[in-house]
Image (tube, rainbow, N blue to C red):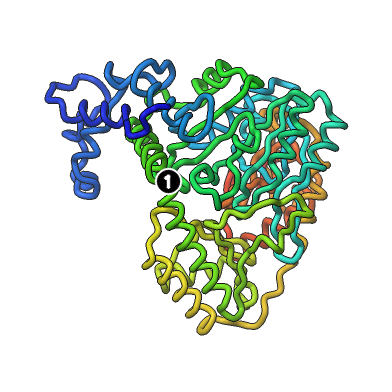
Amino acid sequence: MLNQNQTPLLDALKANAARPHAPFYTPGHKQGEGIPQPLTDLLGKAVFRADLTELADLDNLFAPQGVIQEAQQLAAEAFGASQTWFLVNGSTCGVEAAILATCGTGDKIILPRNVHSSAIAGLILSGAIPIFLNPEYDPVLDIAHSITPHAVESALQQHPDAKAVLTVYPTYYGVCGNLNAIASITHQYNIPLLVDEAHGAHFAFHPELPTPALTAGADLTVQSIHKVLGAMTQASMLHIQGNRIDSDRISKALQLLQSTSPSYLLLASLDAARQQMALQGKILMSRTLQLAEEARTRISEIPGLSVLKMPRLGASLGFLALDKTRLTVTVSGLGLTGFEADEILDEKFAVTAEFASLQHLTLIISLGNTPADIEQLVQGFTTLAKEYRRTNLTVKSHLWQDLFTTQCHALCCSPREAFFAVSEILPLIETNKHICAEIVCPYPPGIPVLMPGEVITKSVLDYLQQIQAKGGFISGCNDTTLKTLKVVK
């Protein structure tokens, strides 16, 4: 057992920041002396004294032998991994590295169609061929959930030469599929199970939270420590266990994807966040769960509102758990879209959600929230229901279902081939039946509706236009106004 009280990287950074010396190395601001005054006024000087480069005492992220190595070993033990890598380019580079380390050009990988855009980037970089699976779908709530063990088993029977399976656990809505069963099925083919666990970094620290991906049998998992724990934005981790994945290929892939000038502020925040959870995780998560339950109970009692609950999901679809710290509120009963409710809550009541969709608002309740936050949230929803209610909202309820059933079978070439193909830009109304050459997704949550290599269909165009008309934001594509799309020429 390692001493989880230690913070080797944080301590080394603190010592070097305080050491008097004449700095003739990057960054150019020289421990804050050259920082513009408005930035110093906002952040103070201390943060810039610690904004250091790869000095001898601070180790090297790509060849760690000192304090970074020690910090990663402590993290591996705390999160239940055999080896851990710190990520300064977010979980995005971790998902990309996972695909690069397991798949080459022409190799097949099985994954859900509602993956994050980082997985699509991984396909483009690696040249892998996606075998997409339809996620289970709730037509009443218009929410796509997880893939099921049965879907994975069927895909592997049809594609026994697949090199890996990738799944999302939990989804952005906090839904957790039967990862134990998926891992068991995947391992029968002696291939690795890769997990995008960006929103599940807290699972290892409380028994009332869903089973962590590694405990459920995943070979690799990527976690956004910054999303739900106490690290700085962009600070994430990649964990592996077992021998199905070559750790050297992970290291080499990350060298391609991460900056050669990593931020030690981000790295040190990972060290500190790990120590915090290792020592106080259960207490912090108990408090968080209590706040989340109070919010869920009180909001569910407000007329016109409902919250996503586990009984509705049902184990029959292969869903075993719901992250209770994730709160999805259906607002369509108020005659409002999620986008409208989000704008009202933010502007009128200073309550800001994680993301909005046509019918819902999804909120992250974490260790940083307070009872005052919950009170403000509940009061905001209470007033929203009383003062902003309109006649019932009519929303086409099968949009996601239309998209996934048509799109999963419309890949004409690999994402890499389409991405690098000769392309042209056409008016949106002229792109039907063309092959898409770019990633197009409403953000957040960053799930692509179109990706390079897919045939553009009328249902997709209708969906994107409705999202935009209701106040959503389209990202990933060259023209975010959605007047044009890039297609293969």
Spot occupied by residue 23 in the image (x, y as percentages of width and height):
18, 22
> What amino acid is labelled 1 in the image?
Gly
Would you identify the image quadrant in which residue 215 lies? top right
Tell me: 5 left or right of 382.
left
- Between 470 and 488, the one nearer to me in the picture: 470
Q: Quadrant of the C terminus?
A: top right
Q: Residue at x 72, y 43 (%)?
A: 113
Crowdedness near tag 1: few (<14), some (14–19) or many (≥20) residues, C-alpha within 10 Å: many
- Between 19 and 300, the one nearer to me in the picture: 300
Which secondary structure, mark 1?
helix
**Farthest residue in the front direction?**
1
Q: Residue at x 78, y 26 (%)?
A: 162
Spot occupied by residue 107 in the image (x, y as percentages of width and height):
75, 23
Residue at image mark 1 = 281
Q: Residue at x 60, y 44 (%)?
A: 211
- Between 232 and 4, the one nearer to me in the picture: 4
- Between 201 and 464, the one nearer to me in the picture: 201
Can residue 1 be seen at all in this image of the molecule?
Answer: yes
Tell me: 42 left or right of 246.
left
Spot occupied by residue 82 in the image (x, y as percentages of width and height):
53, 25
